[in-house]
Image: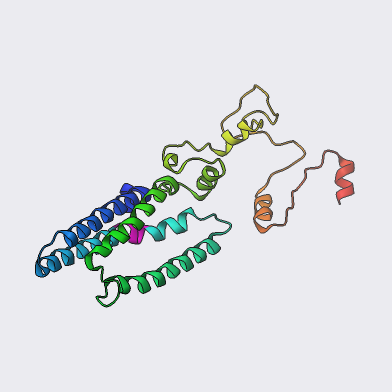
Amino acid sequence: MLLGKYGRRTIHLSGLTLLAVVLVACGVVAVAGLDEIKTGWIEGSLLLLYTFIYGCTIGPVTYALVSEMSSTRTKSKTINIARMGYNAFGVFNCVVTPYQLNPTALDWGGKTAWFWFGFCVLCLAYSYFRIPEPRNRTYAEMDWLFAEGVSARNFASTHVPKFGEMGSKDGLDFGSEGKEGDGSSSPEGVFEVPNEVKVTTSNVQDHALGTGVVHRQPHSEDEQRREL
């Protein structure tokens, strides 16, 4: 529901911003000098809030972004690499965090929030400049936007030309009567087919099957006899 209404980029950036605020609050409580009981209750409540925000924002939206932003030609490889990176960082997280919290190791306690706040700010900066908005975009439109080097911040507002508009830009006027650059006009999306080519339903079926067969309508009786 949130993805369709607000978009992936908006939810991702909002989630990172809220998580950064919660981490700052945890860090402030840790250095505020309150008694251990109050500090424990406040930080525990903030961590629950952190988990709730994560589960509503960047947690699920990341899976949508990975699948939608990947190139159609390398989608499986991109998703696999992203998943391996996610698992590798998960190992780092599981190893480092216990050392930070353990009283017999670093013993940072609630001050650990400042460490992860730095990571959160880095992720927020990267997401702002590098993560686009794929909502209401087809894979073809996404490929075109990436190929044109459109800024991630402008993905949602950039107009993507249709197939006919792209052809006109390259000097091919598909709206003309089968001629390039001809000023004459014809109904949108319609152009004339040469007389010697007869387009039939079987052409479409052959093309779908990959046979590449085009049925040619002969001009003369000689040609008809030769084809027989």
- Residue 165: give x, y in percent of width and height: 57, 33
Q: Give 101 or 147, whichever is nearer the viewer.
A: 101
Q: Is residue 60 magenta?
A: yes
195 over 105 or under it: above or below: above
Relative to 22, is 13 on the left or the right? right
The quarter holding residue 181 reads: top right
Residue at the far top: name it. 183
In this view of the protein, can residue 35 be seen by the observer?
A: yes
- Residue 47: give x, y in percent of width and height: 21, 64
Q: Give 166 or 9, whichever is nearer the viewer.
A: 9
Q: Give 9 or 73, whichever is nearer the viewer.
A: 9
- Residue 34: give x, y in percent of width and height: 10, 63
Q: Give 144 or 103, whichever is nearer the viewer.
A: 103
Residue at the far bottom: name it. 104
Relative to 222, is 181 on the left or the right? left
- Residue 91: give x, y in percent of width and height: 41, 72
Q: From which residue to which does the magenta span run?
A: 57-61
